Image (spheres, rainbow, N blue to C red):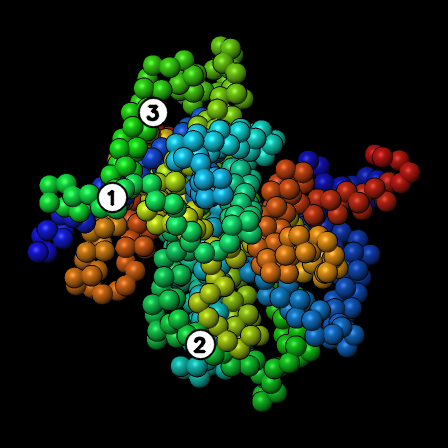
Amino acid sequence: MATQSLIPAGDFRASYAADTTIFPTAGSRYAVLAGIALLACAPLVLDRYWLSLLIQIGYFAVAALGLNILVGFTGQISIGHAAFFGFGAFASAWLSNTFSVPVFFAIPLAGVLTTAVGLVFGLPAARLKGLYLAIATLAAQYILQDFFARANWFTGGVAGTPAEAFSILGFAFDTDQRYFYVVLAYLVLTFVLATNLMRSRDGRALVAVRDHYLSAEMMGINLTRYRTLSFGLSAFFAGVGGGLYAHYLQFVSVEGFGILLSIQFLGMIIIGGLGSIMGTLMGTAFMVLVPEAMGWLTDAVKGSAVDRALALKDNLSFLREMAIGLVIVLFLIFEPDGLAHRWRQIKAYWKLYPFSH
Amino acid sequence: MTSHLLLQLVLNGLIVGALYGVVAMSFVLIYKASQVVNFAQGEFLLIGAWICWWLLTTYQLPFWVGMLVTFAFMLVFGIALQVVVLRPLIGEPIISVIMVTIGLSIFFQALCKWLFGVFAQPFPPIFSAQQVSVLGFEFQSAYVMSLGISLAMMAAFAWFFRYSRHGLAMRATAFDQQVAQSLGIPVRNVFAMAWAISAVVSSVAGVVVGIVNGVSSALSLYGIKVFPAVILGGLDSVVGAVIGGLVIGLLENLAQYVDGQYLHWGNLYEIVPFYVLVVILMIKPYGLFGTRDIERV
């Protein structure tokens, strides 16, 4: 599928640098900067509920970005991402509690630790692909979950563990308004990182591995190295996302890192668009908002005949799960390229209006 | 005493393993025919068991009538699922197909919780005696029935693939879809049939487990347990699935013995199949009887 850019007819790119530029037009650069500026104003306008949703979207997007590098760019499948996310959360809390590492450093360090764990479970990735790898990561999910419940020294066992608030030089980011900026900073940083990775030699190697691993190997790409690398990278982002999550809630417990979250992560990148950085953000927002939307829906019909007949309020958690499953299935059938693709088409439509080509 | 306990555990392991083998067979059936990895296999068990339970408790049907109605429902359900959800995805990349079945599993699991609640519901009593003793060992009647049904299922599968026309068509499709199609085998019907048979067979396993443990969402765990079994046996081998199921069942019970006697970890038996899974994938990813694609990865 040819991607339509918003550059006026003809290809004016004269150098390789121009071809790999992040912002093809000045307009897109200003749009992104304006978007970040707008988000920075969000805590001044939005109430706590919406802010907490935005923070959720933030830390999930960081982790989902890692998964998109693995699945969307390298073509490996992982059904164990939530376990790595959880490991990052526990590792960050553990580092700051046990070794009194400042939280500022604990989050990236947790990312590094998670990378190490990811590499251990990613070892099969060096040998396996497709389906077999999916099943190996499924095993990783269950093994790590079992470890969380067992390792009292690390996770506090079933009781969970507290995590300190994020602070810089004594200034604590312990409210939603303040923590939002921490998440925003990490989000921008990781998205810039991932975008630049994909413009680099290593990033292109990952895409080559996805597109045709045999050709990639013939071109001199070390398959084992890049497969493992992408596994490690994805674990790193998951760990950082997990760290952000831990210090936002200031409490981490074993529940919540189950297979359902792994599937939600996969849902995020599929709905957003595999292999699309901005799509990851869109998909994450969609996936966080869908279960909330079920809540609004039940509030809207509260007390009506439908509500009485189906007892919606009591079954809200099931409704949310059903919505997640349904959204994934419907997207795969009707919009397999995700929201990012649809967004490109909308842009192209207005660009070319009133003509269709 | 401990040797008696050990032997009892081995026998229990084999009986449970035979059930895993049945579920693994129905998993392999879908994979072989349509190259779809069905992560929603456990939900087939769950739906079958709930439907049967509902018929038996609400309408007070005799057991065998309830079973037959359940079969009919699962047949239609399997075909409908294949036609509505999986057919549009033919030719899509493997991640899409895997994700669609995962999405289905989440959806149906939540739907079952919504319709039937989260608590385990016991089946109405089907046997006059809860326990039977064979050669000095105590077995639950349902377990004995389970073993009988599992063996019957395996025999039926063997006959179906070996001698029946549809079984032959299915084997041909599994071997090469394009050639099969060009020889006049309706490949799409074969896909639908594979899903239907798989759903029916799974529902039998679901009902058997439901009789022993009661029906609850925990049933769908069988859909996850099946992965170590099929990987051990080789993903596309029916015989391998049976053997893999037996080995995993045995292993679980032995792990429980070791755990209870020496280690005292608590839930080793639940997690041990996954350790085995990782080890198998590392050393022999195509399993014992699987087709070995010659490619360097």
Residue holding disc 2: A161
In this rendering, the answer to whether B261 lies above or below B133 is below
Mark 1 and mark 2: Cα distance apart in space:
49 Å
Residue ID at (51%, 25%): B192
Query: Quick one: label 2, few (<14), some, or many (20+) residues within 10 Å?
Result: many
Residue holding disc 1: B129
Residue holding disc 3: B157
- Name the secondary structure under disc 2: strand
Q: Is residue A274 left or right of residue B74?
A: right
- Quadrant including the N terminus of chain A: top right
Is tag 1's residue or tag 3's residue first in the polypeptide sequence?
A: 1
Q: Quadrant of residue A51?
A: bottom right
Mark 2 and mark 3: Cα distance apart in space:
51 Å
Nearest the camera: A340 or B270? B270
Residue ID at (55%, 60%): A63
Nearest the camera: A15 or A290? A290
Camera-nearest label, 1 or 3: 1
Camera-nearest label, 2 or 3: 3
Chain for numbered disc 1: B
**Which mark is drawn over residue B218?**
none
Counting from the top left corner in percent of width and height, residue A52 is at 66, 70
Chain for numbered disc 3: B
- Name the secondary structure under disc 1: loop
Type of the residue with mark 3:
Phe
